[in-house]
Amino acid sequence: MAYRHDPDLEFLDSLSSEELNDLVYLLTHDKDGERRLTESLTQEDNYKKHYPDHKQYWKEIAAEIQCFGGNTFANMFRGGGVPYKEVLCDVCDKMKVNYNKDSSTKKIEQNLLMKILEDALEKMSAEEIAKLGKELGLENTSKLTSQGLTAIFLAVFRAGGFKSYQLTVIIVNAVLTAIFNRGLTLGGNVLLTRTASILTGPIGWIITGLWTMVDIAGPAYRVTIPAVIQIAYLRTLMENREAINIANTINL
C-alpha cells in the first residue's frame, strides 16, 4: 500500500535507522519473535533494497502503520490506510483512555501514556509509592498517595522537555518489555542507566506485570497498540534530541 501524506508521521524522516529499528521490528515480528503473517513491509522493494538502513524507506514504514489501522478491504479502495491520528484515537478507545479527539496528536499520546502510568500507580502499595517518591527525589513521601504521584507525573508531561522524555522512556520500555520480552534498544544511552532503579523497581515491574496480563484482541491491535506507544516515544526523542545529547556527553 502507498503512503498517504501524514503530518503526524513526517517526523520519521528525521530519525536515524538505529532509532527506527525497534519500530520496524514490532511491525514485522510478533511477541514470539516470529515474522507476522499480516505484515507487508518486508515485501516492499525499498525494504528489500535498503534493509537494515530503515531511514531509506521511512514512507513504507509509515504506510504499514496506516494500513494496520484501517480495514483491509477499505484500504484497497482508497489506495492506502488511515491517518496516524485515527489509528491513535482507535487505540485510545480500545485502552479506555480519556482524551479529546480535537487535541493535538502529541497531547493524545501523552493521555495514553498517562493512562498506562495511572493503572500502574493504582496497583502500588503505600510502601512502593513511598519508595518511588524517594527515587524521584521527593520529600515527605510517607504521606504520598497514588493520586499525588499521578498529579506530579501529569505536571511533568505538561511541562514537556527532558523530564517528560525520561518518563516516556520508563513507560514505553516497560510496556514493550511486557509485550515483546525486549525493551527499547537504547544502546549506550545513559538514560537507561540513570533510570535503571525505576525501570527495575515498582513502576517498571508493575507496568510490565499489568501488560503481561493484557489480552490484545485482534491481529491489528497487536500491531497498532505497541506501534503507537513506540511512535509516542520516538516523537519525544526527536523533540528532545539536543538535551539528550548534552546529557549523554556530560555522563560519558
Image (cartoon, rainbow, N blue to C red):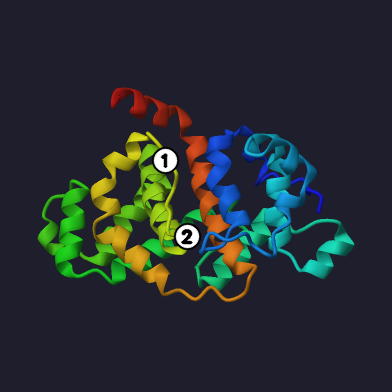
Above or below — where is 252 with respect to 114? above
Q: Residue at x 34, y 39 (%)?
A: 191
**Left-right relation of 235 to 1:** left
Q: Compare residues 35 and 3 and report the one nearer the observer.
A: 35
Q: Residue at x 38, y 37 (%)?
A: 162
**How far across and down, in percent of the image, does residue 141 sit?**
13, 57
**How far across and down, in percent of the image, does residue 131 sit?**
16, 57
Q: Looking at the rendered structure, which numbered label has been put on residue 180?
A: 2
- Badge 1 marks a residue whose secondary structure is loop
Task: Name the kind of residue labelled 1 in the image.
Answer: Leu
**Left-right relation of 76 to 164:** right
Residue where numbered disc 1 is placed: 186
**Left-right relation of 127 to 209:** left
Query: Marks 2 and 1, Cα distance to the nearest angstrom?
Result: 15 Å
Task: Name the kind of residue labelled 2 in the image.
Answer: Phe
- Badge 2 marks a residue whose secondary structure is helix
Indicate which disc, 2 or 1, sits on the residue closer to the N terminus. 2
Q: Residue at x 22, y 48 (%)?
A: 136
Tell me if mark 1 has few (under 14), some (14-19) or many (20+) residues whose alpha carbon lies within 10 angstroms of its own: some
**Left-right relation of 30 to 147:** right
Q: Which quadrant of the view contains residue 129? A: bottom left
Tell me if mark 2 has few (under 14), some (14-19) or many (20+) residues whose alpha carbon lies within 10 angstroms of its own: some
**How far across and down, in percent of the image, does residue 188 sit?**
37, 34
User: Visible in this render: residue 56?
Assistant: yes
The N terminus, quarter of image: bottom right
Above or below — where is 30 with respect to 62? below
Q: Looking at the rendered structure, which numbered label has been put on residue 8?
A: none
**How far across and down, in percent of the image, does residue 208 sit?**
36, 64
User: Visible in this render: residue 101?
Assistant: no
